[in-house]
Amino acid sequence: MANVTIKNLGVTIAAQPGQSLLNSLLYEDVPIHTVCGGRARCGCCRVRLIDGQKGVSPVNKYETVRLSEHVIEQGWRLACQVHILRDITIYLPTADELDRDCSKKNS
Ligand code: FES
């Protein structure tokens, strides 16, 4: 198992290595947003990697399309496209920090 610490919530969950970060968070009832259901279309699942950049899969082409290069350089990733390899620490945006459309469906 790998630990995923959500720093701004003060929560750590155990995740199955290889599982998507989105599914790991949803499984543990962490309030992450998704409108597209994990298809890299809505951008609502974005999280910022604070620590453990090498503990996740590399940025893929879907993230490059959805997030700008500048945003990716700041550590932002799409949780639905990130696969956990080792312990990581993330920042999970609140609903106020996301696009208004992200609040329409809250998983
Ligand atoms: S869940 Fe929509 S982009 Fe990740």
Image: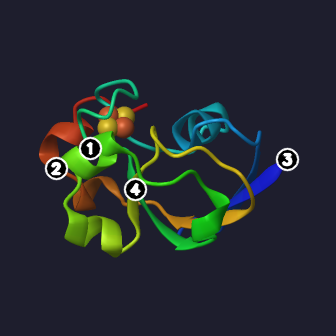
Question: Does the closest atom of ligand 1 sit within 8 Å of the Cβ of label 1?
Answer: yes
Q: Residue at x 38, y 24 (%)?
A: 37
Q: Amino acid at mark 4?
A: Arg
Q: Position of residue 79 (x, y in %)?
A: 46, 46
Mark closer to the observer (4, 2): 4
Q: CA distance from mark 1 to mark 2?
A: 9 Å
Q: Is residue 6 visible?
A: no
Q: Position of residue 17 (x, y in %)?
A: 75, 43
The residue that mark 2 highlights is 99
Q: CA distance from mark 2 to mark 3?
A: 32 Å
Question: Does the closest atom of ligand 1 sit within 8 Å of the Cβ of label 4?
Answer: no
Q: Amino acid at mark 2?
A: Asp
Determine whether the residue tagged by mark 1 lies in a helix, strand or loop. Answer: loop
Q: Earlier in the sequence, mark 2 or mark 3?
A: 3
The residue that mark 3 highlights is 1
The residue that mark 4 highlights is 77
Determine whether the residue tagged by mark 3 lies in a helix, strand or loop. Answer: loop
